[in-house]
Structures are given as structure tokens and as C-alpha cells.
Image: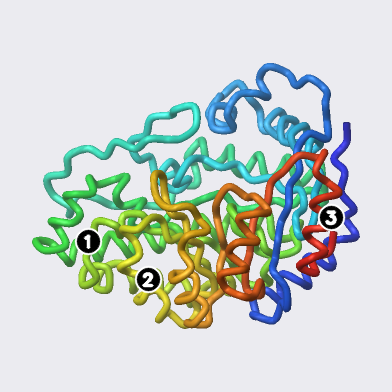
Amino acid sequence: MAIEFDTNKFNRIKRDGCDFWEGNLKRPLIQAYLSGRNAQESPAFENQSELLLFFDKNVSPEVFVDVWERKLSNITFMGDSFPYIRPLIGSSAMAVYVDANYIIDKDTVWFEPPVITDLRNIEIRYNPENIWFKKTIDIYSAAIKRWQGAVQPIITNLGGVFDILAMIVPANDIVLAMYDQPDQIKRLTWQIHKVWWQYYDVISQIIRPSSIGFMDFWLPIPCQKPSFLLQCDFCCLLNEKLFDEFVKPEIEESCNRLGGAMFHLDGPGAIRHLDSLLSIDNLKVIQWVPGDGEKDVTEWPELYQKVRNAGKQLFITGEGTRGNFDKIVNHLCSSEGLAYLAYGNVNEKTDFQKWLSMYDVPV
């Protein structure tokens, strides 16, 4: 079964994406994905995780694209959603590209940094010959050749600078070195920053001519300037002083280079840094993820209001239900400036049409 999507919608999606990033979209941005369109039985390998398929040397880029095509043919795209492809390589593709020590699991990539005795011995370099970077590029090239932009190529998750550092140097050692070897931590921070942007620019040069904008791996909203969801789960280990000295300057510099800068705020341990993040002028959107075992995504109205009061927009991540979004809107008394990923089954299409129309989201 073929992918079902009217590519004429891309003009409207591109225009609305520009309005969102400028803060001028007078409605929420909702991408709704309904599964169950294709009832045909899938081949056995299609039920494997995307990670295992990517790291399987016997799976060619063309076969990887075949799998994505079958997955996309199973989806009905509603609201601001559209078909896209991005080879997601765990929590940091860049850490894989620079040959950090990793273990491939079914659903993720685990990193086991070795014991480091002297940070001066560490150098992070751009490596265009890494086999997995080359496979990433080959997958994008195969997808572009097949779909000519009808399926949008989206950048992979390169990871956050300090999260990448923590995949190379044990996290506790990094914290101690912030006191004992601060210059080395800052050197590595900016070294990773430089290499990160090299990977970002090379991938963008390949996919941008076939896309309607720069788009993030998690919430692809087209932006006419570089866009990415910045992240630093490592920040939960830091107090405010260490965050502001070591982490914030790099985030701020990346925001200055991005036209569409979002930040992934993950869990209660990261909230202590929210005020600092909100002070970054070019940071446009905060994504809030409560984390496992925490209160439901609907139960953080004070955090959402603080983000709004700072003039930032919100990307809400949760179970993707219509009801959760409605509750958040009720808390905030407005749906403007909200971005949301909604999920359902194709049997709910009529209900989704009514729900999206209620928020003035094109069906």
C-alpha cells in the first residue's frame, strides 16, 4: 500500500511553521498520527527495532528505506503532521560517529565510557569516514532519490554536547573535573560543540534541498533557519552555579546559531535550571518531559505558566492523547503557543477531525 499524503499541504505546513517560530501562529501546532491504515502483514524484519536495522550491516540503506515506506503507509497524517524519515541512532548519533564506547540494545544504545586518568589526552574530532555516519548519509541519499521530498528527510538526534561528553568521560569524573580541571572541561565542551556543528552542517547540506525547512528529529516543524532540540540530561547532576558556568554558554551559543532553538527539559532534576534557560533570548521553545514515575504531563501547570510568562512556547510530550492536551489548555486558558504530538488509531479519524477543528487546526 502506498503512502497516503497530499504533498500540496507542504506549502501550508511550511507557512505555518514559519509563523510558529516567529510566535505568530494564532492556534496550537498539532501533529496527529493515526496508525492502522494498512492491515497487511509485515515482513518479520520490519518488526525489528529501528536501531537493530540500522546497525545490521546486512540491511542496506535501500532496505532501511523500504521498511520506513511500509511504516509510513500504515499512517494517516492529520493536522500539521506529514511523512518523514530520519535514522535515529539512540540518544546521540554523534557519540557513535566519534567512536565512543557503545553497546547496542534492542531499543537504545548504551554508552560505557572508560576510566580517564588525564583529560588532556582526550581529543574529539570530526570523522567523516565513520561507517555509521556514512550509512546515515547513504540512507538519506536513498530516501531523497526515492521520494524527491514527498517524504521529508529529518536530521537525526546528534545529542547534547554535555551528554556526549558523558558518553566519553564518566559523568562523576566530569563533575569532579569542573572543580579540579575546569579548563579541560571547557576545552572539551567547545571541541564537541565545533564537531557537533560539523556533523549538523554536513547532514543539512544533503537533506535541505529536498525539504521544506530545517527540522528537528522529535518535533519536525519547518524552519527556514537551522533548527534543533538542544538537550542536556547531564544537567540534573549540577547545581545552578556549575550549570551557568559550564553548560549555559554552549547552549546560548547554539541558540544564537539556530533560528528554531528548542530545549529538552527532562525530569524534576532539571527544573532548577529553568530560570537560567528562560533568560536565553534566542531559545524559542521548551519541551517538558516529566520522566518515569513522575506526575502526569497534565499536572505541571505552574511550570507551563512560567514558560509562557517568559515569552517562550511549549512543546508538550506525554501519552499523546486528546484528553491530556485538553486538560493542559484548560489550565492555561489558551492553546496558542503550544505544540503537541497526538497519536491514535485510524478508526478514531472522525473524532480527531472534530478535535482538531475545535482548535482551528487544519484537518
The location of residue 130, given as percent across then percent down, is 47, 40
Q: Who is closer to the viewer here, 135 or 336?
A: 336
- Residue at image x 59%, y 53%? 217
Q: Callout 1: helix, strand or loop?
A: helix
Earlier in the chain: of badge 2 and badge 3, it is 2
Q: Circle 3 sits on which residue? A: 353
- Residue at image x 64%, y 45%? 86
Q: Which mark is residue 274?
A: 2
The amino acid on which the numbered mark 3 sits, given as a three-letter code, is Gln
Please identify the quadrant where the N terminus is shown: top right
Up-down relation of residue 144 to residue 46 (above or below) = below
Q: Nearer the viewer, mark 1 or mark 3?
A: 3
Up-down relation of residue 78 to residue 313 (above or below) = above
Earlier in the chain: of badge 1 and badge 3, it is 1
| 87 to the left or right of 184 | right
Q: Callout 2: helix, strand or loop?
A: helix
The image quarter containing residue 315 is bottom right
Q: Callout 3: helix, strand or loop?
A: helix
Q: Circle 1 sits on which residue? A: 185
The image quarter containing residue 96 is top left
| 314 to the left or right of 22 | left
